[in-house]
Structure formats: C-alpha cells, structure tokens
Image (cartoon, rainbow, N blue to C red):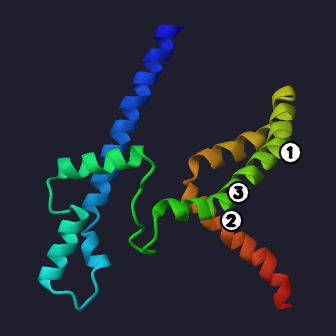
C-alpha cells in the first residue's frame, strides 16, 4: 500500500511539472506581453526597460524557474489586463465559482442520481434510453458549446416573457 501511495505521489509531481511546463510554454507562445502592457507612446528604450524589469530578457529556463518558484510560494504575479495581483482576482471570483459548483452538485444529487438509479433498476424502459442518450450527448458535447447553448436558452426563456 505504501509503495502504491509513493508511486501515485511521484506521478502527481511529474504531472504537475509537465502541466506547468506546457502552460508556461503556451503563455510564452501566445505573444509578447509587453505589447499589451506598454503604452502606445512607449519608446524602444522604455520597452527594453519593462522587459528587463519583468525578466523577459532572460533565457526561458531562467524565466520558467522564476515562474515555478514563485507559483510554489503562492505568488502568481500581476494580471496584465487588470494591473492587480492575480491572486486577488482569483479570490474575488471564488465565491461565484463555489456557487456554480454547488449548484451543479445539487442538480446531480436531486436529478441525475435518482434518474440513473431508476434507469439502472428498470433497464430497457423509455426512461433508461432517454437517460443514456442524455448522458452520451452530455459526454460528447464540448463544455464551451454546451455553456453557450445554455446561456442562449436561459436568455430566451427569461427575456421572452418580459418582451410581451
């Protein structure tokens, strides 16, 4: 049992490392952050100063090491868009995230579990086929597309009566 736990911990550390490298690389490949941060009237010298201040003039390995050590300490830097600490933005939106997650868990407990149990007990019934079809569509549909459809459905359901 102890060997299994140590193996899983090792796999977790390797997975976290790989994910952090991929995220770091994708952020770096997405474009030059200085182009977003620098004002339009900034000179080339100003841009070089900003680049040196942020450490973007250093090799990628040094930048990654700095990123990883700060992330392990809970310092996720400044948001480029909001010019505030990123952790503050995370904490601001954490309540809404918990609400959304809690609502999803509530829906699963109230609707999905009873329907799934009923479908499992009464295999081959219409409810069983509907539940399996709904589950298959839910698994196959990309989350961003489902989210967009639900937003459009919610807007049409709740604004249509107001327009009459």
Name which residue lies at 18% across and 78% down: 47
User: How far across and down, in percent of the image, does residue 95 sit?
Assistant: 68, 59
Horizontal side of residue 8 vs 154, given as left or right: left
- In the picture, residue 123 is in which quadrant? top right
Q: Nearer the viewer, residue 100 or 47?
A: 47
- Residue beneath disc 3: 100
Q: Nearer the viewer, mark 1 or mark 2?
A: 1
Task: Say which label, 3 or 1, has the lower sequence index.
Answer: 3
Name which residue lies at 84% across and 31% down: 117
- Residue beneath disc 2: 150
Horizontal side of residue 85 vs 24, given as left or right: right
Image position of 63 with respect to 135: above or below: below
Label 3 close to label 2 by CB (< 8 Å) = no
User: How far across and down, in percent of the image, does residue 109 sit?
Assistant: 82, 42
In the picture, the disc for residue 110 is 1
Task: Say which label, 3 or 2, has the lower sequence index.
Answer: 3
Horizontal side of residue 46 vs 136, given as left or right: left
Numbered label tally:
3
Distance between the alpha carbons at the discs numbered 3 and 1: 15 Å
Image position of 23 with respect to 126: above or below: below
In the picture, the disc for residue 38 is none
Instruction: Name the element at disc 1.
Output: helix
Horizontal side of residue 5 vs 51, given as left or right: right
Name which residue lies at 12% across and 81% down: 45
Q: Nearer the viewer, mark 3 or mark 2?
A: 3
Distance between the alpha carbons at the discs numbered 1 and 2: 19 Å
């Amino acid at each position: 049992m102890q060997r299994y736990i140590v193996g899983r911990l090792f796999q977790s550390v390797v997975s976290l490392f790989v994910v952090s490298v991929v995220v770091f690389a994708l952020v770096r490949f997405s474009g030059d952050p200085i182009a977003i941060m620098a004002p339009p009237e900034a000179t080339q010298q100003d841009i070089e100063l900003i680049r040196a201040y942020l450490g973007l003039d250093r090799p990628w390995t040094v930048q990654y090491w700095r990123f990883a050590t700060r992330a392990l300490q809970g310092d996720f830097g400044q948001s480029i868009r909001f010019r505030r600490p990123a952790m503050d933005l995370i904490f601001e939106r954490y309540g809404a995230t918990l609400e959304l997650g809690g609502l999803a868990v509530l829906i699963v407990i109230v609707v999905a579990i009873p329907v799934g149990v009923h479908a499992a007990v009464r295999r081959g019934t219409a409810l069983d086929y509907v539940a399996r079809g709904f589950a298959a569509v839910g698994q196959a549909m990309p989350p961003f597309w489902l989210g967009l459809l639900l937003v459009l459905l919610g807007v049409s359901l709740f604004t249509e009566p107001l327009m009459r």
